[in-house]
Structures are given as structure tokens and as C-alpha cells.
Image (cartoon, rainbow, N blue to C red):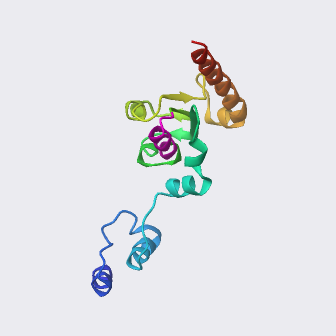
Amino acid sequence: RFATLSEAAVGRSAKELPGAGAAGGLGFALILMGGEFRSGAEVVADLLGLDDALAGADWLITGEGRTDRQTLLGKAPLVAARRAAARGVPATLVSGSIERRDLPELSGTFAGCESIVFGPSTLEACVADAAGLIADRAEQLARLFAAARER
């Protein structure tokens, strides 16, 4: 009832928008006051100057700890890859783990999706050796890119 009365008072509709109920209705209040919803990943990309950094880039390598359905909803790696694609720059995703069922959809945005884990391992072991695992995968990607450039 409060939402309906508030919308009528300010002449703006907001209660059905995604995020309006977040943080106890803070999103709803901000929209009523003229605010707008923006993806956090988009805001960070703008603040970091990602578009300028992609100018003249040959390839983007981005990643996260775990890649799954949530990534496809607009997390930072997806935002970065889409911005790269808009500039003709291919993107590779490097992740601690990748949900296999999401690979077909991820492949529509990423030129490749790579896990840093080379075989069965526990989460604890992967976290303990994350830097080494990332370095190993980065070396393998560098070898792949170098071989492709030599052709």
C-alpha cells in the first residue's frame, strides 16, 4: 500500500522494477527521487576507464573465482567481454571453476573459457595454490597466443 501511495504522490512508477525491493526498499526510494538503476559492473568499468584501456588491445583476459549462471546475468567478466567485443577485441575467461552447463551460452560472448584447475582437487587446495594455478594457466594461454601469432 505504501508503494502505491508513494508512486501516486510523485507520479513515478518504481515498485515493479528489478532491485526496487533490495536493501529494505532503498532502490524503490531512490527511483522515486529520480535515481536510476545501473549495473555495478558497468559503473566500475566506467570508473576504471575500461573502454579506453581496450583501445588498441589485441585480446582481453578476464576472470573470476567461479563462473556460473550468475556470470551471465551481468557480472564483471561478462560486462568486460561485451565491451571488448564491441571494439572487435576477443575475450578469454579464466576462472577457478566453470559450470559446464553454462558453456554454450558463455561461448557466445567469450572466445574461450578456461579453468585454472587441471584435475580433480579440493576447494581448499585450489585456494591455497590460487596464485600458482593462475600463473600456470596464464603461461599456457600465452603459449597458445604466441603460437597463433606465429602462423
* Residue 106 point in image, percent of width and height: 42, 34
**Relative to residue 108, is residue 132 drawn left or right?**
right
* Image quarter (top left, top right, bottom left or bottom right) of the N terminus: bottom left
Q: Residue at x 47, y 29 (%)?
A: 111
Q: Is residue 30 magenta?
A: no
Q: How would you classify the magenta stretch by its main secondary structure?
A: helix
| Left or right: 95 in relation to 79 | right
Vertical side of 105 occupied by 150: above or below: above
Is 121 rendered above or below residue 4?
Answer: above
Q: Is residue 81 magenta?
A: yes
Front-most of residues 32 and 57 = 57
Q: Could you tell me which residue is drawn at 64 percent across and 21 percent down?
A: 140
Q: Residue furthest top?
A: 151
Q: Is residue 49 left or right of residue 23?
A: right
Q: Quadrant of residue 29?
A: bottom left
Instruction: Decide if residue 91 is in sight here.
Output: yes
Q: Report the number of numbered marks.
A: 0
Residue placed at 70% from the left, 29% from the top?
A: 135
Q: Position of residue 147 (x, y in %)?
A: 61, 15
Considering depth in this image, is 150 or 8 the residue closer to the camera?
A: 150
Q: Which residues are magenta?
A: 78-89
Residue 36: % across, % down: 42, 68
Residue at the extreme front of the image, as rendered? 56
User: Which residue is at 41% across, 48% downward?
Assistant: 73
* Position of 53 relative to 141 (above/below): below
